[in-house]
Amino acid sequence: MREENAKTLIPESHELHVGPSACARRLSIGAYQYHNEDRITNLYITEDDIVSGSYEDIIPDAVEELLELLEKKPRVIIIFVTCIDDLLGTDHEALLILLKERFPDIRFITCHIDPLIMDRSIKPGMKMLEQLYSVLDKSELREKCINLIGNKFLLSNKSEFRNIMNSVGWELKEMNACKTFDEYNEMGKSSLNIVVDPVAKYAAEQMERALDIPLRLTYDSYDLDIIEENYKKIFKAIAEKMPKLSDYRKSTVKKISETVKYLKNIPIVIDNGAVSRSIPLARALDKYGFNVKLVFDGTIIFSDVEDLEWLKENRPDIKIADGRNFNIMNMKNNLGDCLCIGFSCGYTLGAKHIVERLPSCFAFGYYGVELLMELMIHAYNTVVDYEKIRERSEAWKYEPIK
């Protein structure tokens, strides 16, 4: 989940970004890129604010001024602070208490945007998700609903997952599908949280403690065996008989076989900028018979360690490299013509065939694998036009995967 996308998912919310003007520049550009500029306000702090210690004191007054300017009062205000906040040691709990007393009709949360603490066990993105779900009210009522926790995009209607769950009387709920805050708050009444991205594990654990909603780890996967295991976990948790999935699996196996044959053993390169779990994807594609050669991933996450060790032991010819290292350019001539899953690795290697990005939980389940096969075939049949990609990027047009 790119943070610029994730932060504005709470409906009827507004963001107040607090920090030096230089820090806010990137965030403002991101807001315009995703057409969220009406939901974001910047509060620039000066050197005088920092030196005098008045940094915390100006936030409540800024909130009051913001509420006077906004046409519609937000239900939630998310205060984002930058890395300078760690140096100043802001007491966020005291700040939130003050804000809630002064503005009792509004819910407040604080989030960090801080690349300096990426080496901590609880990273900024993990804490941010936890904070976004923390505004949900605890409910004694339990509905036949399942929350998708950590999905970056709205689940596709083509995914079999929604149809399967609806067929047994269960509804799926997603943060990014909610139109109002009251609708979003209904997620607190669900009976189960399924975690589709490792980054969301911490948030789901906190929801289990605060809201008494149990969780199951069902990370989005392109491995058919793991997809089936995920379904078993979900149906065991909701105590329902699982429908037969054999037809879905047969269709996907056929699609995989056709794609392997069609690509004619072209080298495959995978970039963790295109998919949150590049190592498990490499193992799955290798299992299906694709010619996986290289993975750009310099930040192995906890959920992928087992797959990484398996690749090292059983497929040492599949290289794992940090795509941020300039030495990666030395591999360019060794690969020749290749198909890259991810724009960054494709651009670095000068590849002719690129799957720009993967849909993540947009296509949870068997449909996700079939969609990946379609994207790979399309990339194989198309010579990438880097100029068009650059122009699309400069125009700030975001085109969802169909």
Image: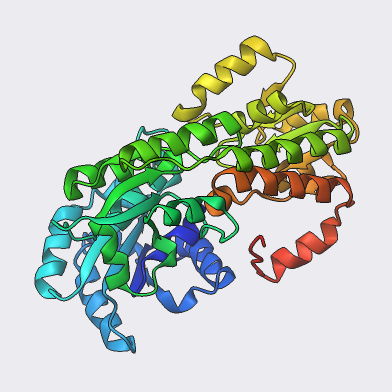
Residue 66: x %, y % from top left: 30, 80
Residue at the spot 84% in from the left edge and 60% down from the top edge: 387
Say which of 30 and 106 sits in front: 106
297 vs 126, left or right, is right
| Quadrant showing the C terminus | bottom right
304 vs 173, left or right, is right
320 vs 305, left or right, is right
**Residue 152 visible, this angle:** no
Residue at the spot 60% in from the left edge and 29% down from the top edge: 279
Q: Quadrant of residue 292?
A: top right
Q: Quadrant of residue 190?
A: bottom left
The vertical placement of 208 against 298, above or below, is: below
Residue 128: x %, y % from top left: 35, 51
Residue 323: x %, y % from top left: 67, 34
Residue at the spot 56% in from the left edge and 61% down from the top edge: 157
Residue at the spot 19% in from the left edge and 60% down from the top edge: 137
